[in-house]
Amino acid sequence: MKRVADEENLHTVGEMPADIPGRSGQQKVVDVERKFLSNAPDDLPPIRVIEEWAFSEYGKRIGPRLVAMMKKSPAPMVIPEVLRSWNISPD
């Protein structure tokens, strides 16, 4: 029974990237670096933006890796759903 629960959790985690383009209010992907402790006594900001991409740009960036993962993964897969949400062709 444990294996079934683990597979359900993995499926849920795998679906999260598919939700990002539709749920984000920013319409972009942002790579950030967070300072810990955020209230450390220095002049550094608590969050530093490293790079930003529009969803379409980031989809092109992650597309080849997702397609390769899809080709290696046994069924059932959540990756085709992720590809669709990011407008990535599996070919």
Image (tube, rainbow, N blue to C red):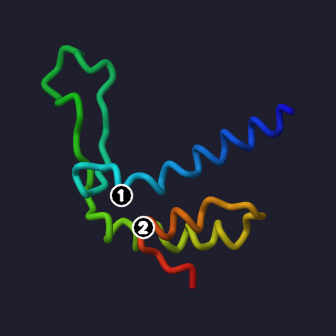
Residue pushed farthest bottom? 91
Nearer to me, 53 or 18: 18
Q: Are marks 2 and 1 in contact (CB under 8 Å)?
A: yes
**Disc 2 packing (10 Å; few <14; some 14–19; many ≥20):** many
Q: Quadrant of the rendered structure where residue 5 is? A: top right
**Does residue 34 lie above or below 67 as drawn?**
above
Q: Which residue is mark 1?
A: 21
Q: Residue 71: percent from the left, percent from the top?
A: 69, 73
The residue tagged with tag 1: helix, strand or loop? helix
Q: Residue at x 83, y 32 (%)?
A: 2
| Label ID, residue 11 | none
Q: Is residue 61 above or below residue 41?
A: below
What residue did someone put label 2 on? 86
Kind of residue at disc 2: Trp
Q: Is residue 30 above or below residue 41?
A: below
In which quarter of the view is residue 65 placed? bottom right
Q: In the displayed structure, does residue 83 sit left or right of residue 47? A: right
Residue at 74% in and 37% down: 6
Cα distance between the residues tagged 2 and 1? 7 Å
- Local crowd at mark 1 within 10 Å, few (<14), some, or many (≥20)? many
Residue name at image x 31 percent, y 39 percent: 33
Measured as percent of width and height from the top left, residue 84 is found at 48, 70
| Disc on the earlier residue, 2 or 1 | 1
Q: Quadrant of the N terminus?
A: top right
Q: Is residue 52 left or right of residue 7?
A: left
Give the residue type that dot 1 points to: Pro
User: Along the line of sight, which residue is nearer the eye, 64 or 88?
Assistant: 88
Quarter holding the C terminus? bottom right
- Outermost residue toward the left? 43
- Residue 54 in the image, given as x and y percentages of width and height: 26, 64
Q: Nearer the viewer, residue 51 or 62?
A: 62
- Please, what secondary structure does the residue beneath circle 2 have? loop
